[in-house]
Image (tube, grey):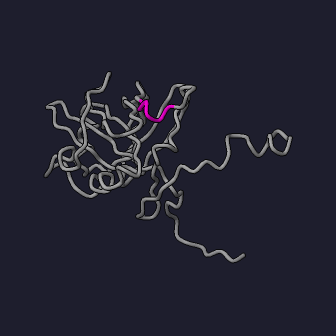
């Protein structure tokens, strides 16, 4: 099998695409679409988002040390794209996209009501990395839309039709192929 050698780059795709909602101390709110995001620790629950310093939302995160990660779905794909290409300096993205800003429990940034999961986050560390600054944050509160809970109270994200980002495209996901460890149990082996 032939492989080409390319210059170093980010080829870790697909990525979760989220809408990060923020607010400054004056009460101005904004939404930024972020694909440079991820889980970094489970205990304590921690995540990261990486944002370019020239983005309108950057100063809000830096000023307050807070943000909300809002998971995205197929029904939100237009808003996801819009919030990624338009600046909050010029428009109210909540209004333009018909999104509902809900009050959070423990941070000043709003939740996006239409998102199936909202994670309230408090920054614990900033890392200037080059083109982006990574904000490491502790998850303080998680809000899960009851429409996506099964009869046992388990969250079923696949019902929300989540989307991911890959090389400039948004892709549908959520089809279940198996459960964690299924191949080990199926073959009767443990690793």
Magenta run includes residue 145: yes
Image point 41% across, 48% down: which residue?
A: 73
178, 17: nearer the viewer: 178
Q: How many marks?
A: 0
- The residue sitting at the right extreme is 188
Tell me if 109 is positioned left or right of 70 in this view: left
Question: Percent x, y for residue 150?
Answer: 54, 31
Position above or below: 10 against 116? below
Image point 22% across, 46% down: which residue?
A: 98
- The residue sitting at the top extreme is 106
Image point 26% across, 27% down: which residue?
A: 103
Question: Percent x, y for residue 171?
Answer: 46, 59
Tell me if 146 is positioned left or right of 181 in this view: left
162, 3: nearer the viewer: 162
Tell me if 115 is positioned left or right of 179 in this view: left
Tell me if 147 is positioned left or right of 28 in this view: right
Question: Percent x, y for residue 179?
Answer: 67, 41
129, 55: nearer the viewer: 55
Instruction: Assign the N terminus to one quadrant of the image.
Output: bottom right
Image point 34% across, 49% down: which residue?
A: 76
Instruction: Assign the C terminus to one quadrant of the image.
Output: top right
Question: Percent x, y for residue 121?
Answer: 38, 31
Magenta run includes residue 3: no
2, 158: nearer the viewer: 158
- The magenta segment is 144-149
- Res 122 quadrant in image: top left
């Amino acid at each position: 099998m032939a492989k080409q050698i390319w210059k170093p780059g980010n080829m870790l795709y697909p990525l979760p695409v989220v809408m990060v909602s923020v607010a400054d101390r004056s009460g101005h709110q904004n939404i930024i679409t972020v694909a440079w995001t991820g889980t970094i620790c489970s205990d304590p629950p921690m995540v990261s988002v990486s944002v370019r310093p020239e983005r309108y939302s950057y100063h809000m995160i830096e000023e307050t040390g807070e943000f909300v990660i809002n998971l995205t779905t197929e029904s939100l794909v237009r808003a996801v794209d819009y919030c990624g290409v338009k600046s909050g300096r010029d428009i109210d993205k909540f209004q333009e996209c018909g999104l509902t800003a809900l009050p959070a429990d423990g941070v000043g940034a709003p939740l996006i009501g239409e998102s199936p999961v909202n994670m309230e986050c408090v920054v614990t560390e900033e890392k200037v990395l080059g083109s982006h600054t990574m904000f490491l944050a502790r998850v303080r509160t998680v809000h899960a839309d009851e429409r996506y809970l099964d009869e046992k109270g388990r969250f079923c994200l696949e019902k929300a039709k989540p989307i991911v980002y890959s090389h400039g495209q948004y892709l549908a996901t959520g089809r279940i192929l198996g459960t964690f460890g299924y191949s080990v149990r199926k073959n009767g082996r443990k690793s």
